[in-house]
Image: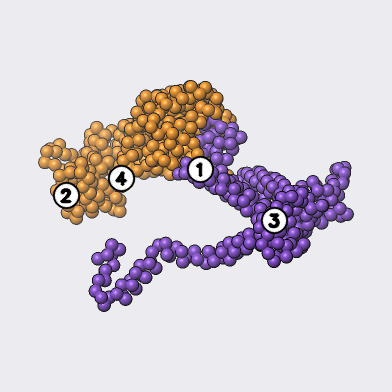
Amino acid sequence: MAADGSLAVSDASGVSRGSANTMQRFARRRSTIAFVMTLPLLVVIVGLVAYPAVYAIYLSTLNRRMTEFAGLLNFELLFESDTFWNVAFQSCFFAITAVLLKASIGFWLAHMLHHIPNKGQRKWRGMLLVPWVIPPALSTLGWWWMFDPSYSSINWLLAVISVPEVPWLGHHWWARIAIIMVNVWIGTPFFMIMYLAALKSVPEQLYEAAAIDGASSWQRLRYVTLPMMANIISITVLFSLIVTFANYDIVRVLTNGGPRDLTHVFASYAFQVGILSGNIPRGAAVSLFMFPILAICAFFVLRSVTRRNKEQM
Amino acid sequence: MAEVSLRKIIKAYEGGVQAVKGIDLEIDDHEFVVLVGPSGCGKSTTLRMIAGLEEITGGDIAIGGTIVNDIPPRDRDIAMVFQNYALYPHMSVYENMAFGLTLRKFPKAEIDKRVKNAAEILDITPLLERKPKALSGGQRQRVAMGRAIVRNPKVFLFDEPLSNLDAKLRVQMRTEIKKVHQRVKTTTIYVTHDQVEAMTLADRVVVMNHGIIEQVGPPQELYHSPATKFVAGFIGSPAMNFFPARLEEASGALRLHLPQDIVLEVPEARAARYRSYAGKQVLFGIRPEHLTDDKPTDKTNPAPLTLTPEVIEPMGMETLAHFKIDGAEISARLDPETPARAGEPLRLIAHMDQMHLIDPTTDKVI
């Protein structure tokens, strides 16, 4: 009897049967089954992520006409370009500001919703999720109309309270703020719903214990709610940072990178350089800059989540 | 430490449902009082009102002579131990215990002293650096108690603290709680649905049912002199047996006529108490331990009866026999060496000096 309980075949006539058994045993192994089950996903990841990534690296090493190997020339030229550094700054400024705002407003909204009695909560939850379910390009168009210098409804409202007209998309700082506003409007519901779920999972007795221990409502938030939500906050912030950093549609629809290329982010700039200006290797080089920044963020956030999980387990 | 007074306490929810219907209770300083009753009797609600976690609909609660109706939990100087322990999972055992003191801005040295002292009382000193997840149920319960002890509050509140532990650990922790109370002597209010916990821990037991207090008294008093049918049936395990009976008087003696033509004589000492019920339908109550097997040594047996057990349960130190009379489940505690067998008639004796009669119209013990 073999270790796994199957009968070992030792006679010469059973050789072929023996190899069939080995195959069966191989197919039955947990690792084999796991591999087969994840194969469809692996194919998708290789086809849509790994291959384009490797191809982008290859493209970034070519010359403009894509006829010969140019080494790191594209990267060198980017480093020398002011526009590129503006794009890098705007990408980081946009992603960090927008994510911080989305997380804070989402947290506040989740708290408000959490304190509405269950009956009315569903209605508000549904309404607050609307910005997230509308296609971003469509809602950005709506915002574009609202920011339009001639018909801006926002400026009209500001005029009602005697605030002077704002050049929303005409001045680069206002345009940057406008892009962040739209992104926050679209992205906040995601944070809100995640934080609401996290809030609901905090046991009520912890708050009661804290109340008896002498905690004020601010201290309950600081010492109970936030630590209990730390993991979900880290993960949503990381996830949103990646998505926001790689955002393309809002910039493309709202400002198209203008004025003077000062509102471009990596994705929209890569598209402009690679597709619109026809310099595909340079565009590939721009898009590759997103990877190391996001990889470092992901590493630190996931490490802190793992550490916290280990501590609390 | 302080006394606690509940005066006409009412708790009503939306729709007018009353969970607590105007209870009065005076708890003395250093006393250990247990609120016991079935689910939904209002015991936990009462405790939560004392803690300040539930608003009071009517009445007054006073702790140490001060009415605390509108005082938030943190200013009531109470500590509470919850059923699910409610330990902060992200804090170590030390931090959990120190949390209340830190918030109250105690000096570090004082916090350290108190936490270490409480840890010593509860035997959890080696666990101080661990997180709650790394502790067993019993250890978590100790930490929850430690968190209460370090505060040195006026009143300890326990909300079914042993319900989540296994049977063996429950017995062990019960003793621990009693030991802690004997040592720190803080006024304690303890809620449980387990009457054994209530009997073993309490100086006084408060039996609650449907939002009212059925009876308050020391455990032995509740056991021997229950005031109502509910208390008689709730206290004691297995529960008291109840038989529908008719009280008849013949030539000066009172006799109980039970189903299956069983007739039991009422002891003379009780006759005066029960005489006014002669000729009436009553409920005869007797505890299983007062319904025993008829041993040859029991020469003074006043009330023999023969019943056929359906089930015999040998427990080691005793044997339980279960009978059915007119649909009612009856049990008796027999000698562990009893020859009784299921399905075979068994001669029992009822210790009538321990009997109870209940007026079926009021459910009050006569």
Q: Quadrant of residue B356?
A: top left
Q: Label 2 is placed on what type of residue? A: Ala
Residue at horizontal 45%, vertical 63%?
A34
Mark 1 in CB contact with mark 2 (< 8 angstroms): no
Question: Callout 1: residue from which chain?
Answer: A
In the depicted structure, whether residue A19 falls above or below residue A114: below
Foreground: disc 3 or disc 2: 3
Same subunit, tags 4 and 2: yes
* Quadrant of the image containing the N terminus of chain A: bottom left
The residue closer to the viewer here, B82 or A2, is A2
The residue closer to the viewer here, B224 or B86, is B86
Q: Label 1 is placed on what type of residue? A: Arg
Residue at horizontal 21%, vertical 47%?
B314
Q: Which residue in the protein does label 2 denote?
A: B340
Q: Which residue in the protein does label 3 denote?
A: A73
Mark 1, residues whose alpha carbon is within 10 Å: few (<14), some, or many (≥20)? some
Q: Which residue in the protein does label 1 denote?
A: A308
Tell which chain the image draws in purple: A
The residue closer to the viewer here, B131 or A82, is A82
Q: Which mark is residue B242?
A: 4
Real-space CA distance between mark 1 and mark 2, rounded to the nearest whole angstrom = 62 Å
